[in-house]
Image (spheres, rainbow, N blue to C red):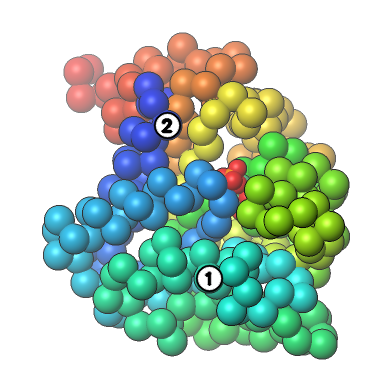
C-alpha cells in the first residue's frame, strides 16, 4: 500500500481529485468506480473545479458507483444517484447513460445485483476505483464480516453505519436498513484503488486497514492483498499509524516519492 499523509483534509481531497483527473486525461475512455459520503463531497468539488480549469472532457468516461440504499428510488433526495448527479455528473460533460448506480428500488435484489456485476464485466472491469472508509472499516457497504471475495449483493447495514449516515436523512428511522453494494471481490479486481480518509473519527479504521491483520472484521484490510492501492490521508486520520514516520520518510507530506533524492 502506498500511504500518503497530507497536512490537511482539503489537501488530501484535492490531490485525490488531481489523480482522477490525470487518469481521465491519460485515458479518455477510463472506467471509474466511484464512492459517496461526506469525504467524497470535497473530492468531487475539487474534481469539478479541476475539470473546468483544464477543460476536461468526460464524454467517453464510464462510471460505476459502489452502492445504493435498498428501497430508495433514484429520484429520492437521499439516493446516491441524486448525490452523484448533484455533486459531480451535472457539472461535467459526462454521458449520463454511461454512469451506473445500483438500481435499488426493484423487487429482486439478487437480480439487480447480478445485472450490475454483468455490466461491469461487459465493459471489461474497473480501471480506477475510488473508495472512502466507514468508521467500522467498511468499503462500499461491505460491513464487517463481509466475505473478502463477495460480489454485488444486498447487505444489512450495521447500526453504527446507519447512525453515521443519519445526517443525510431527517430521522434515524428513515435511514434504510439495507443496501445493494458491490462486493469486496469486485473491488479487488479493479486495476487500481484510491482510498481517501480524513478526520480523527477514521483513525482506528485506518489503522486496522493498513497495519492490522487482513480480516473480514475490517473489510478495508482486504486492500492489503491488492498490488496497486494508494491511501490518501490527512494527519488526523493517520494519527494512530505506528509506522507513520516511515510513510512520511518515503512520501514526505504526501509527495509521490523521496527516492529522487537518492
Ligand atoms: C458510506 C458509503 C461508503 C463511504 C462511507 C464514508 O457508508 N457507503 O462508501 O466510504 O459512507 O462516508 P463519510 O465520508 O461520510 O465518512
Quarter of the rendering occupied by the C terminus: top left
Could you tell me which secondary element the residue under label 2 belongs to? helix
In this image, 126 relative to 90: left or right?
Answer: right
Q: Residues within 10 Å of mark 1 (few under 14, many from 20)?
A: some
The residue carrying mark 1 is: 82
- Residue reaching furthest to the front: 170
Residue at position x 82%, y 87% from top?
A: 107
Could you tell me which secondary element the residue under label 1 belongs to? helix
In this image, 188 relative to 193: left or right?
Answer: right
* Label 1, label 2: how far apart the Cα atoms are: 24 Å
Residue at position x 82%, y 86% from top?
A: 108
Residue at position x 74%, y 38% from top?
A: 136
Q: Determine the image quadrant of residue 205.
A: top right
Residue at position x 32%, y 41% from top?
A: 15
In front of the other: 257 or 65: 65
Residue 9 disc label:
2
Residue 153 seen in the figure: no
In this image, 51 relative to 40: left or right?
Answer: left
Give coordinates of residue 44: x percent, y percent: 39, 54
Give coordinates of residue 146: x percent, y percent: 81, 54
Position above or below: 53 against 159: below
Give coordinates of residue 85: x percent, y percent: 45, 71
- Residue reaching furthest to the left: 54
In front of the other: 245 or 108: 108
In primary-sequence order, the first of circles 1 and 2 is: 2
Residue 42 seen in the figure: yes
Amino acid at each position: 500500500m502506498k500511504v500518503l499523509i497530507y497536512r490537511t483534509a482539503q489537501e488530501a481531497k484535492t490531490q485525490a481529485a488531481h489523480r482522477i483527473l490525470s487518469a481521465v486525461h491519460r485515458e479518455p475512455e477510463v472506467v471509474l468506480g466511484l464512492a459517496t459520503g461526506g469525504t467524497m463531497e470535497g473530492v468531487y468539488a475539487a474534481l469539478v473545479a479541476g475539470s473546468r480549469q483544464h477543460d476536461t472532457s468526460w464524454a467517453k468516461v464510464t462510471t460505476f458507483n459502489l452502492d445504493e440504499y435498498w428501497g430508495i428510488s433514484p429520484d429520492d433526495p437521499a439516493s446516491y444517484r441524486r448525490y452523484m448527479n448533484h455533486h459531480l455528473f451535472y457539472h461535467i460533460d459526462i454521458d449520463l447513460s454511461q454512469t451506473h448506480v445500483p438500481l435499488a428500488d426493484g423487487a429482486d435484489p439478487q437480480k439487480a445485483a447480478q445485472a450490475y456485476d454483468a455490466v461491469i464485466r461487459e465493459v471489461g472491469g474497473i480501471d480506477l476505483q475510488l473508495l472512502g472508509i466507514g468508521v467500522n472499516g467498511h468499503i462500499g457497504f461491505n460491513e464487517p464480516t463481509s466475505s473478502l471475495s463477495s460480489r454485488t449483493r444486498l447487505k444489512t447495514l450495521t447500526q453504527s453505519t446507519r447512525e453515521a449516515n443519519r445526517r443525510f436523512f431527517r430521522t434515524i428511522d428513515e435511514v434504510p436498513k439495507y443496501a445493494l453494494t458491490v462486493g469486496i471481490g469486485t473491488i479487488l479486481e479493479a486495476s487500481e484503488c484510491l482510498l481517501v480518509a480524513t478526520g480523527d473519527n477514521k483513525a482506528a479504521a485506518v489503522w486496522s486497514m493498513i497495519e492490522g491483520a487482513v480480516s473480514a472484521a475490517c473489510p478495508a484490510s482486504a486492500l492489503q492483498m491488492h498490488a496497486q492501492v494508494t491511501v490518501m490521508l490527512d494527519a488526523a486520520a493517520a494519527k494512530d499509524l505506528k509506522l507513520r514516520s516511515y510513510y512520511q520518510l518515503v512520501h514526505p507530506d504526501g509527495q509521490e516519492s523521496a527516492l529522487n533524492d537518492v
